[in-house]
Image: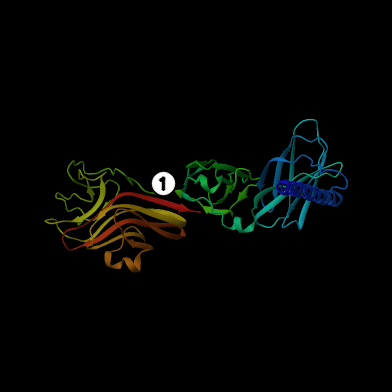
């Protein structure tokens, strides 16, 4: 009995001893932890706890030409006296003094002479006690010469001088490119330089009181980002404007040619145009004008279809005197056969040369292409030179034809 009692007593003593050891070890761990915390405070918080000043809020990056603007809001802390901006791994920096007001302040910093490209910026605010905010980072882009070299000018469909004005037809600019529109300069009849702006979506522009013989220049404006602080420009493009002088020199130039014979059938004879007898092969000495119901309008025509007489040296033309200068003759062709020889010709004198002499006698000529505008540029050197312009063909074979719906004469400056 005594032995059992002693055994229980010994067990109690052992448990009590173990508890004391555990408590002592716990106290030792706490003491060590406290000592480490005290060491940390001595090393890092010897001046007390860390105090952060208010950080900048709602930060935005505004791209520019060799520069960038960073903006944001100071909302909470009235003690802020400056903001520091770091980039290039903090090797570059900028200090912006801050004068806080009682409310919310907007701060803006423009960084100049920046390299083109994308950069990450770190913004830190500092108060009058030297306390710093947590870092605020933002990525922004700087544009430069590489970007500007890629800017394309808007394309001009056509420019035409008529009366005292120039009418311009534009292609519409794609908004996704950042294009805003185009600015242009031209000289008026008083030798003053006038400026105009053409919006991105404008398709037509009229330059009034335009001095013929001068060029105008234009360039396209770009804003690469909605937050950008700079507008970018393409290179200036110089444009020569042609003048429509059709009504001055040509009569009955189409579309919808008038006929001279009074006939109402398919074959007619065009008014104001000289036609050779072989062209007038539609019967009763009529021909040179096709009034077929399937055509969009009456067409100047040289044709030797099945059953019709051949046309060995056919000509349809007008003759008049032109002053010296550069000109463009444009013939809008309809359908044309693949056989035969078919020319648009400008020649000196009161008539077109025979078909075989065209290559050596014409001022300019070209083979007509069907269903398109055929242009022929030529130069007149004399002060007043008589010229003949028109169509001619050799259709000695059958099933050959050529049609033209409109003729235009332009003068270049």
| Residue at the limit of the structure toward the left, as seen here | 307
Drawn side of residue 361 relative to residue 117, left or right: left
- Work out whether residue 348 can be spotted: no
Residue at (27% x, 42% y) in the render: 258
Residue at the front extreme?
1
Q: Is residue 176 visible?
A: yes
User: Is 372 on the left-hand or right-hand side of 146?
Assistant: left
Q: Nearer the viewer, residue 232 or 92?
A: 92
Q: Is residue 389 left or right of residue 90?
A: left
**Residue 152 picture quarter:** bottom right
Q: Position of residue 263 (x, y in %)?
A: 19, 42
| The one of 148 and 74 positioned closer to us in this rendering | 74
Image color mode: rainbow
Residue carrying label 1: 248
The residue at 19%/53% (across/down) is: 280
Q: Is residue 388 above or below residue 20?
A: below
Residue 119 lies in quadrant:
bottom right
């Amino acid at each position: 009995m005594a032995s059992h009692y002693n055994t229980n007593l010994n067990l109690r003593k052992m448990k009590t001893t173990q508890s004391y050891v555990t408590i002592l070890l716990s106290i030792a761990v706490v003491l060590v932890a406290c000592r480490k915390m005290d060491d940390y405070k001595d090393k890092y918080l010897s001046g007390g706890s860390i105090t952060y000043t208010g950080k900048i809020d709602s930060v935005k990056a505004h791209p520019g030409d060799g520069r960038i603007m960073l903006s944001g809001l100071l909302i909470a802390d009235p003690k802020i006296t400056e903001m520091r901006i770091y980039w290039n791994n903090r090797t570059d920096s900028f200090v912006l003094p801050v004068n806080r007001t009682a409310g919310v302040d907007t701060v803006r910093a423009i960084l100049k002479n920046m390299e083109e490209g994308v950069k990450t910026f770190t913004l830190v605010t500092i108060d009058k006690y030297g306390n710093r905010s947590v870092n605020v980072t933002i990525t922004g882009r700087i544009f430069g010469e590489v970007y500007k070299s890629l800017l394309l000018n808007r394309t001009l469909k056509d420019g035409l001088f008529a009366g005292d004005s120039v009418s311009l037809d534009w292609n519409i600019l794609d908004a996704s490119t950042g294009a805003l529109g185009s600015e242009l300069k031209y000289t008026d009849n008083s030798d003053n330089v006038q400026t105009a702006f053409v919006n991105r979506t404008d398709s037509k522009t009229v330059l009034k009181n335009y001095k013929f013989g001068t060029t105008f220049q234009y360039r396209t404006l770009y804003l690469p980002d909605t937050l950008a602080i700079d507008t970018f420009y393409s290179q200036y493009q110089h444009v020569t404007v042609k003048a429509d002088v059709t009504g001055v020199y040509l009569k009955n130039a189409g579309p919808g040619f008038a006929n001279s014979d009074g006939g109402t059938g398919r074959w007619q004879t065009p008014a104001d145009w000289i036609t050779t007898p072989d062209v007038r092969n539609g019967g009763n000495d009529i021909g040179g004008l096709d009034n077929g119901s399937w055509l969009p309008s009456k067409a100047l025509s040289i044709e030797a279809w099945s059953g019709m007489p051949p046309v060995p040296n056919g000509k349809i033309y007008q003759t008049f005197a032109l002053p010296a200068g550069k000109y463009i003759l444009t013939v809008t062709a309809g359908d044309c056969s693949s056989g035969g020889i078919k020319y648009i010709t400008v020649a000196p004198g009161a008539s077109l040369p025979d078909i075989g002499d065209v290559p050596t006698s014409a001022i300019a000529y070209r083979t007509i292409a069907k269903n398109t505008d055929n242009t022929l540029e030529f130069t007149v050197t004399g002060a007043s030179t008589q010229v003949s312009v028109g169509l001619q063909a050799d259709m000695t074979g059958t099933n050959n034809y050529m049609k033209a719906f409109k003729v235009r004469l332009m003068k270049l400056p």
